């Protein structure tokens, strides 16, 4: 953009100011878009692409050091290897997705679900009474038992859950929940707290 004064000369000062304003407008648009793009990539960085739950990286970078949760559970799908071996990995992926959806549908927005490994999910709860936690985990277990896979009416899904209830560092809660999961897995389809 340029401006002409009475004697025909270009006023460079006005041209420069106009260009700076154009540049600032462009940077504002680019900055806004860049922020949106970075937010999108950060979200993808911390989400498991299959289950749309948080991933292990999110646990390691965001949850591991917290000391405010008072309930935690480690959930493992019973005989998941057998499901993959018998029905194939595509059906195994469907089972993982449906289990994750069942869990997410039964917890509060303030709680967190992490796909911790293969078929293990770590669930972290804040400000939850012990009896409510136990009831919630029993309901999650029951909902998982109700999962039906189209085309495979004989496929039964169940999960074992190890849980703890007290305020501690997230890492300590995970370790204790994992120990209780090991006990729950002995009988399968069990909740141990």
Image (spheres, helix red, strand yellow):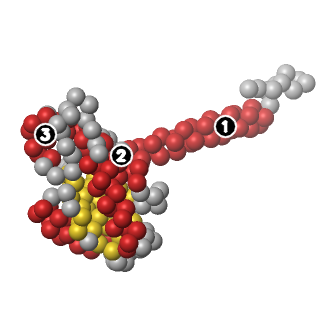
Mark 1 against mark 2, which lies toward the viewer? 2
Task: Find residue 101 and name its label.
Answer: 2
Picture quadrant where residue 190 is located: bottom left
* Residue 100: x %, y % from top left: 32, 48
Instruction: Locate the C terminus and report the quarter of the image it occupies.
Output: bottom left
Q: Residues within 10 Å of mark 3 (few under 14, many from 20)?
A: some
Q: Is residue 41 above or below residue 188?
A: above
Instruction: Sort mark 2 into few (<14), some (14-19) or many (20+) by Cα contacts within 10 Å.
Output: some
Q: Secondary structure at mark 1?
A: helix
Residue farthest top in this picture: 8
Structural distance between the alpha carbons of marks 1 and 2: 43 Å
Q: Earlier in the sequence, mark 3 or mark 1?
A: 1
Residue 60 against residue 129 in the figure, above or below: above
Q: Is the C-beta separation of discs 1 and 2 under 8 Å?
A: no
From the viewer's perspective, is 17 left or right of 176? Answer: right
Mark carried by residue 25 = 1
Tell me if I can see residue 117 in this picture: no
Q: CA distance from mark 3 to mark 1?
A: 54 Å
The mark that comes first in sequence, 1 or 2, is 1
Report the quarter where the N terminus lies. Answer: top right
- Residue 140 in the image: x percent, y percent? 33, 55
Residue at label 3? 84
Residue 127, placed above or below residue 15: below
Reading the chain from its start, which is encountered first: label 2 or label 3? 3
């Amino acid at each position: 953009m340029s401006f002409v004064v009475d004697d025909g000369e270009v006023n460079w000062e006005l041209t420069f100011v106009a260009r700076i304003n154009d540049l600032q407008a462009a940077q504002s648009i680019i900055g806004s878009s860049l922020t949106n793009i970075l937010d999108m990539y950060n979200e993808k960085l911390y989400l498991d692409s299959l289950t749309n739950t948080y991933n292990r990286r999110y646990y390691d970078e965001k949850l591991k050091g917290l000391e405010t949760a008072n309930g935690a559970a480690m959930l493992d799908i019973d005989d998941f290897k057998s499901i993959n071996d018998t029905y194939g990995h595509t059906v195994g992926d469907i089972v993982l997705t449906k289990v994750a959806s069942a869990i997410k549908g039964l917890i509060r927005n303030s709680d967190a679900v992490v796909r911790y490994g293969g078929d293990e999910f770590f669930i972290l709860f804040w400000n939850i009474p012990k009896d409510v936690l136990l009831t919630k985990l029993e309901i999650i277990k029951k909902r998982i038992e109700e999962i039906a896979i189209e085309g495979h009416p004989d496929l039964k899904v169940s999960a074992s859950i190890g849980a703890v209830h007290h305020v501690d560092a997230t890492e300590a809660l995970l370790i204790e929940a994992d120990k209780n999961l090991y006990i729950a897995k002995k009988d399968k389809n069990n909740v141990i707290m």
